Image (cartoon, helix red, strand yellow):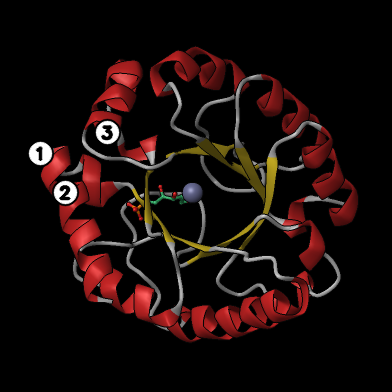
Amino acid sequence: MYRIAPSILSADFARLGEEVSAVIAAGADYIHFDVMDNHYVPNLTFGAMVCRALKPYAGDTPIDVHLMVEPVDDMIAAFADAGANIISFHPEASRHIDRSLSLIHEKNVQAALALNPATPLNILENVMDKLDMILLMSVNPGFGGQKFIPAMRAKIRRLRQICDMHEQQTGRHIPIEVDGGVNSNNISELVADGAEIFVAGSAIFGQKDYAQAISALKQGCLKG
Ligand code: DX5
Ligand code: ZN
């Protein structure tokens, strides 16, 4: 039920393919792929060509693409064609949120919105039917290795209530993914708050033994 999504933002960029294989062998459930454009966020990472090159290393493990780019629509098509399985984007970066979500589904890819710490939850209200996941940022996007913002715990709980209500009405479960500052010390609290998917960059790639790091996170989940 709980899934760990290592963010390759904290991997060794000179050996990305090997790093992807290594975290999958170590128990990763998803590969989290942070796309930054030095426009929507003050940092620059990798594009769809790198995603396409890494796809064979990911094998059957879903690639969870987190777009921190503006505008988003062209990148949605490019990443869908490059093998993305889930695509998240930030509502502030799209002129037409509903249209961007539909573009993702037209490519048979799962769609998610990524909400910054200060972005209110009511932005979700009219598009719940189109969301396969919701990504809650627990740091401001742009960099790995930042500290979890404590106020995000209450936001996870509020979002869980909204998603549970949606599930009662429609029978559709929408998982919450938490991204930023997740580690083996705080993950059980985030499980208790209602999150199910956890992005972890520095908490995994900052350790020598990836299997041990992922198993510590999974063990933390079971305590939540
Ligand atoms: C931040 C990225 C995160 C980041 C997480 O903009 O979206 O995915 O890599 O890194 P850690 O786990 O180190 O906070
Ligand atoms: Zn991310």
Q: Regarding mark 2 in the picture, which secondary structure is present there? A: helix
Q: Amino acid at mark 3?
A: Val
Q: Amino acid at mark 1?
A: Asp
Q: Disc 1 versus disc 3: distance between alpha carbons?
A: 10 Å
Which numbered marker is on residue 213?
Answer: 2
Q: Position of residue 1 (x, y in %)?
A: 40, 59
Q: Position of residue 64 (x, y in %)?
A: 53, 40
Q: Is residue 178 above or below residue 7?
A: below
How busy is the neighbourhood of tag 1: few (under 14 within 10 Å), some, or many (20 plus)? few
Which numbered marker is on residue 19?
Answer: none
Q: Residue at x 20, y 63 (%)?
A: 184
Q: Is residue 9 left or right of residue 15?
A: right
Q: Amino acid at mark 2?
A: Ala
Q: Position of residue 203 (x, y in %)?
A: 23, 52
Which residue is labeled 1 in the image?
209
Upstream in the sequence, badge 2 or badge 3? 3
Which numbered marker is on residue 23?
Answer: 3
Q: Disc 2 versus disc 3: distance between alpha carbons?
A: 10 Å
Q: Residue at x 32, y 39 (%)?
A: 10
**Is residue 96 among the parts visible in the rendering?**
no
Q: Is residue 209 left or right of residue 57?
A: left
